[in-house]
């Protein structure tokens, strides 16, 4: 194998947590911008930074934390001093080009992460501008690309992914982003870290509808491309909270009519579909398939009370929760919800084009014939890539009533550096303490980059 390519920083993951590192490591630094909205709503913070003319990456993040302001919260407030967007002047940040640091971003698919693989018309849970990065507002993106939509509306998947895909080129860092590069292992090395990856560019031409799964390999057994190795001094681990897709672990799970990829109802012809899940993506799929004329059996391990708790919390603000409530309360015969139930087996009939699903609730079992089984059972953070370190990462469980659940790595809260592995930085939701607040998630970027630049004497 060739000598590993060395970079000062490597970012693993190109989703909403990893992608913002590319412009900031590429030299786009935040500076304070006087904002009337910030002054009105957070006058103490506005006054604190009024005379600060240097890059905000030069702040003493540890002192800020001791003052009761965690870095992610600070940059959230500066970026979003109010939740409704009215104009760029309300953002209390301006970005200026400074010296870049040597880095690479590696991602196993296109940038944008899991948003590449959600249903075609899926609405996010948030107004579009909550999903933006501070260095490039969604309003700027709309103006520059000639689009026409309200950035305060819930944003549709294809609009969001269009924004994410444009970031590397827009900020001149496309040459530092290597898509279709799957990291298979991260190990200790005399230089810091040894990263082993495989070129999976052949997957870029594969059709996820035909594959019945997202267009990237799920296990190393499926890898056939060239092996590549890199070393780095600092590693940002931003693989996401759903980097490892869950399985049902039941017989027949890999039959052709079983899919874990859903883009649109037309991809699942026939009459009867079993949707397995219970979270927001499963709710979306069950609703859309019903409205497309399918007979949907929606199987959940959770109780009715838990599911309706989510529906009732969301029906006032999310149109598709209003719709699923209407369907269920209206007694439609084409959407049956089955609670406290698990699938136990899937069997093929009719030469494998359709099948029989067996499900169990306590001691009771039931079988139904289906044309398709759709698994919307989410995923989990994958820390298995980190191998050979003396001290394994300490993980803490984070969850809330909105179905957000992830095992987060314990970190130093002023820098988000791992307390167990020096110079390793869990990004986004993988950092301890980050909750399901999309307008706060990107705040880890600035504290992490600041810590690296200070260690390198660049601030």
Image (tube, rainbow, N blue to C red):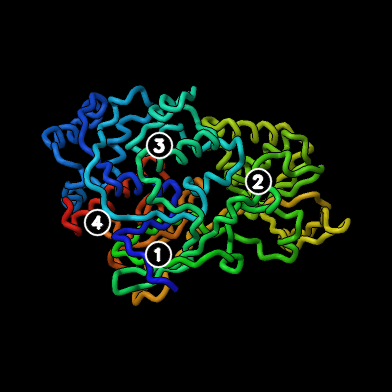
Mark 4 vs mark 3: give the one in front: 4
Q: Nearer the viewer, residue 108 or 250?
A: 108
Q: Is residue 343 left or right of residue 439?
A: right
Residue that label 3 marks: 132
Q: Secondary structure at mark 3?
A: loop
Q: Is residue 221 left or right of residue 126?
A: right
Mark 2 vs mark 1: give the one in front: 2
Q: Earlier in the sequence, mark 3 or mark 2?
A: 3
Q: Earlier in the sequence, mark 4 or mark 3?
A: 3
How far, Cα to Cα, is label 3 from label 1? 28 Å
Q: Earlier in the sequence, mark 4 or mark 2?
A: 2
In percent of width and height, residue 97 lies at 24, 40
The residue depicted at 45 percent of the width and 40 percent of the height is 164
Q: Earlier in the sequence, mark 3 or mark 1?
A: 3
Residue that label 4 marks: 452
Q: Nearer the viewer, residue 7 or 387?
A: 7
Mark 4 vs mark 2: give the one in front: 4
Residue 413 location, quadrant: bottom left
How far, Cα to Cα, is label 1 from label 4? 23 Å
In percent of width and height, residue 10 lies at 35, 58
Disc number placed over residue 262 in the picture, else none? 2
Q: Secondary structure at mark 1?
A: strand
Q: Secondary structure at mark 2?
A: loop
Residue that label 1 marks: 395
Whether the residues at callouts 3 and 1 have beta carbons within 8 Å, the answer is no
């Amino acid at each position: 194998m060739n000598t590993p390519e060395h970079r000062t920083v490597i970012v693993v993951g190109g989703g909403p947590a990893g992608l913002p590192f590319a412009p900031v490591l590429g030299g786009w630094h935040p500076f304070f911008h006087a904002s009337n909205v910030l002054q009105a709503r957070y006058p103490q913070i506005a006054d604190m930074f009024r005379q600060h003319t240097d890059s905000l990456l030069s702040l003493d993040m540890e002192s800020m934390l001791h003052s009761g302001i965690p870095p992610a919260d600070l940059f959230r407030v500066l970026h979003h001093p109010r939740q409704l967007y009215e104009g760029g002047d309300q953002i209390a940040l301006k970005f200026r080009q400074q010296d870049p640091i040597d880095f690479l971003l590696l991602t196993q698919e296109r940038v944008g992460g899991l948003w590449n693989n959600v249903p075609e018309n899926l609405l996010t849970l948030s107004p579009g501008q909550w999903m933006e990065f501070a260095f490039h507002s969604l309003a700027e993106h709309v103006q520059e690309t000639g689009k026409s939509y309200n950035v305060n509306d819930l944003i549709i998947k294809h609009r969001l992914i269009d924004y994410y895909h444009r970031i590397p080129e827009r900020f001149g860092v496309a040459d530092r982003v290597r898509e279709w590069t799957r990291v298979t292992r991260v190990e200790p090395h005399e230089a810091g870290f040894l990263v082993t990856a495989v070129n999976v560019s052949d997957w870029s031409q594969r059709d996820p509808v035909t594959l019945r799964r997202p267009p990237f390999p799920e296990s190393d057994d499926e890898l056939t491309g060239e092996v590549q190795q890199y070393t780095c001094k600092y590693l940002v681990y931003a693989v996401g909270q759903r980097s490892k897709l869950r399985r049902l672990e039941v017989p027949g799970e890999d039959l052709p009519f079983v899919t874990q990829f859903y883009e649109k109802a037309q991809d699942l012809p026939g009459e009867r579909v079993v949707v397995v899940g219970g979270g927001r993506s499963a709710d979306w799929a069950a609703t859309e398939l019903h409205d497309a004329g399918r007979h949907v059996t929606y199987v959940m391990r959770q109780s009715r009370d838990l599911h309706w708790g989510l529906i009732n919390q969301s029906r006032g603000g999310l149109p598709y929760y209003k719709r699923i409530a209407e369907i269920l309360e209206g007694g439609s015969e084409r959407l049956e919800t089955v609670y406290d139930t698990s699938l136990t087996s899937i069997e093929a009939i009719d030469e494998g084009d359709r099948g029989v699903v067996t499900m169990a609730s306590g001691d009771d079992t039931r079988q139904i014939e289906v044309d398709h089984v759709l698994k919307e059972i989410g995923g989990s953070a994958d820390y298995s890539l980190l191998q050979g370190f003396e001290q394994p990462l300490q993980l803490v469980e984070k969850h809330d009533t909105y179905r957000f659940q992830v095992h987060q790595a314990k970190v130093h809260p002023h820098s988000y550096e791992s307390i167990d592995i020096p110079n390793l930085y869990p990004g986004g939701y993988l950092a301890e303490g980050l909750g399901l607040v999309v307008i706060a998630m990107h705040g880890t970027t600035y504290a992490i980059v600041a810590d690296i630049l200070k260690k390198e004497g660049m601030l």
